[in-house]
Image (cartoon, rainbow, N blue to C red):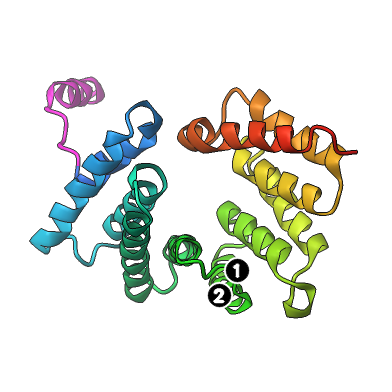
Amino acid sequence: MRWFPLFALVLLASAPAQAQTPVETARGLLRQYQEDPGRIDRARDLLEAAVAKGGAADDVPTLLTLARAWFLFGEERARTDEAKIAAYERARDLAKRATVLSPREPDAHLWYAITLGSWSRAKGLLGSAFALRDLRKEVETVLRLDPKNIEAHIMAGSIARELPVVLGGDRKEAEEHFKTAQRLDPRLTGVRIELAQLYVNVGRYAEARQELQAVLAERAPTDKPRWTLKEAPRARQMLESIRDKR
């Protein structure tokens, strides 16, 4: 029987590759969308078709990947305010559905928070203290379920930074959330952008420049598509805006 492991390896090597599921294919398309933003559309259409057939309508990974595709469509592909709002609204509804199906799934609540925030911003509602409080409640749910959720720490930090003090805003708490996210993933450049904004808000310009320069110097960003299309350009813009600040 010593030949069995080798025989098994030969069979595995000669067997045809298993076809990817729609959600696996969609995730592959979204992994490097900066090279071809049209991949966002293809991922979205693929998963919408899977949901329309009925088999994936209650599948949480499918719903969340589709929510992400619609979110990215709103960020990168929509050309009008109306198209952005519609994309974020569809993403929000998909993520909300996932929270109903799987109420203890952190990623469901995370994507509901992300898409709710994006939709509120596009509608001009995110400046409302009440909207921010509702968003904070959802983020707190994510952190209760997953205390090391990096994106939730970033969102919690952003909310604490933007809320007025009388409604729970806390700049020190915001910095703590951002620093926690940095420790969990030092190469996630988005958190440096958010931390730099905090430093700009409170007049700590030297520290803001340090974070922004680190964004531009990063050679292996965790989220390369977002770094390429959003974060590096924003870092350059922010650096220019505080060039003469001391």
Quadrant occupied by the C terminus: top right
| Span colored in magenta | 1-20
Q: Determine whether label 2 and label 1 are within 8 Å by CB.
A: yes
Q: Is residue 188 visible?
A: no
Return the residue found at the far right: 246
Quadrant occupied by the N terminus: top left
The residue where tag 2 is placed is: 131
Residue ID at (36%, 33%): 33
Q: Secondary structure at mark 1?
A: loop
Q: Could you tell me the amino acid type at mark 2?
A: Ala
Q: Could you tell me the amino acid type at mark 1?
A: Gly
Vertical order, 158 against 6 (above or below): below
User: Does residue 14 belong to the magenta stretch?
Assistant: yes
* Residue 176 placement (x, y as % from top left): 77, 56
* Residue 66 placement (x, y as % from top left): 29, 54
Q: Observer-nearest residue: 149 or 46?
A: 46
